[in-house]
Amino acid sequence: MRTERGVVSQMELDDTDRAIIAALLQDARASQRELARTVGVAQGTITNRLKRLENNGVIKGYSVVLDPESVGWSMTIMAGLRIEKGKMISVQKVISSDPRVFAVYDVTGDWDSMVLARVKNRADLDDLTKTV
């Protein structure tokens, strides 16, 4: 939740909020009726709590989690990059635009950035390293 100054403040979560979140982490497609049964509260409580958790940015959305291998992405790779000073943001934008890349991080130490990607095979990995 943001304050007037744009600072993020933490929302206090009680046991019911935590139980709802835990149930959603197990099954984000659970109906409010199922959540009420699982958590042990009225369906109206679930409705109100979900609305509050969403409005305060605790729950940002609901999504599908794919099994990468079942859709042909058999390798997950992590690559460390050294990037020329002053070009970090532009390089990361180009890299992150590739659909095989699912995360790009700024890091400290020997590398400037870490890239996580999923590729189909070694040839696809070779293509990724040459095109990005």
Image: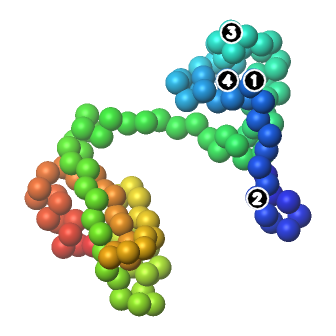
Position of residue 97 measured from the top left corner of the image (x, y, whole percent): 39, 66
The residue at which mark 3 appears reads as 37
The residue at which mark 2 appears reads as 8
Q: Judging from the image, what secondary structure is the residue with disc 3 in?
A: helix
Q: Judging from the image, what secondary structure is the residue with disc 1 in?
A: helix
Compared with 42, 128 (above or below) is below
Q: Judging from the image, what secondary structure is the residue with disc 2 in?
A: loop
Q: Amino acid at mark 3?
A: Arg
For the residue carrying disc 1, how many other residues have a C-alpha within 10 Å: few (<14), some (14-19), or many (20+)?
A: some
Compared with 15, 56 (above or below) is below
Q: If you read the primary sequence from the N terminus, does the residue marked by circle 1 or circle 2 appear first?
A: 2
Q: Amino acid at mark 4?
A: Ala
Q: Amino acid at mark 2?
A: Val
Q: If you read the primary sequence from the N terminus, does the residue marked by circle 3 or circle 4 appear first?
A: 4
On residue 19, the disc is 4
The residue at which mark 1 appears reads as 16
Separation of marks 1 and 2 at Cα, in angstroms: 22 Å
**Quarter of the figure with the C terminus:** bottom left
Camera-nearest label, 3 or 4: 4
Q: Amino acid at mark 1?
A: Thr
105 sits to left or right of 10: left
Separation of marks 1 and 4 at Cα, in angstroms: 5 Å
Are circles 1 and 4 on residues that touch, CB within 8 Å?
A: yes
| Residue 110 visible in the picture | yes
Residue at 23% x, 72% y is 131
Q: Residue furthest bottom?
A: 85
Position of residue 82 measured from the top left corner of the image (x, y, whole percent): 31, 80
Q: Quadrant of residue 19?
A: top right
Q: If you read the primary sequence from the N terminus, does the residue marked by circle 1 or circle 3 appear first?
A: 1
